[in-house]
Structure formats: structure tokens, C-alpha cells
Image: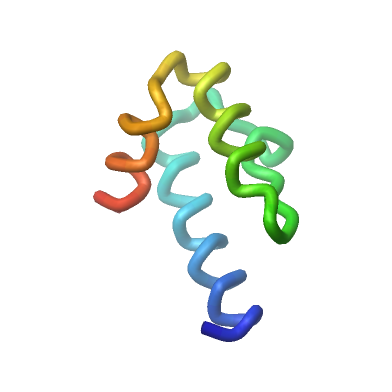
């Protein structure tokens, strides 16, 4: 997938996560290339979920 397609996909996912979890902010969801684990770590702390739970939630959106 090209960068534009990946970015668009992340923007949709980010929006859906923010709808599902109102406590999330733009800073929590800030993603720069190659830092997927960093974002997952921030979400784990903020939402109190495991990495596996978060991945299932994201994949289910």
C-alpha cells in the first residue's frame, strides 16, 4: 500500500477509536512512520488494555 493509502486508513481507524473511546486525544493517537509499538504503548496506558486486546479492537473496526 502506498503512503497516502496507509495514511488514509490510519485516519479512519483513528477516528473510529476516538468514537469508541472518548478519553483518547490527538496526542494519544499521533503516529509517525515505523512507531506502531509506541502508539500501542500509549493506548495501553490510556485505556488499561493489553496489546492483544488493542490489536483485536483495531482489527475489528
- Lateral position of residue 50 relative to residue 1, left or right: left
Residue 19 rendering spot, x and y as whole percentages: 42, 41
Compared with 13, 39 (above or below) is above
Residue 42 rendering spot, x and y as whole percentages: 62, 28
Residue 18 rendering spot, x and y as whole percentages: 49, 40
Q: Quadrant of residue 32?
A: bottom right
- Lateral position of residue 51 relative to residue 41, left or right: left
Q: Quadrant of residue 45?
A: top right
In terms of depth relative to the viewer, which is nearer, 28 or 16?
28
- Lateral position of residue 52 relative to residue 36, left or right: left
At 54% across and 29% down in the image, what residue appears?
43
At 55% across and 80% down in the image, what residue appears?
5
Number of disc labels: 0
- Lateral position of residue 29 relative to residue 49, left or right: right
At 68% across and 41% down in the image, what residue appears?
26
At 59% across and 29% down in the image, what residue appears?
41
Q: Quadrant of residue 28?
A: top right
Amino acid at each position: 500500500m502506498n503512503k497516502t493509502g496507509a495514511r488514509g486508513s490510519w485516519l479512519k481507524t483513528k477516528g473510529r477509536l476516538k468514537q469508541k473511546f472518548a478519553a483518547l486525544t490527538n496526542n494519544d493517537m499521533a503516529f509517525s512512520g515505523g512507531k506502531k509499538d509506541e502508539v500501542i504503548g500509549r493506548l495501553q496506558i490510556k485505556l488499561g488494555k493489553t496489546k492483544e486486546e488493542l490489536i483485536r479492537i483495531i482489527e475489528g473496526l
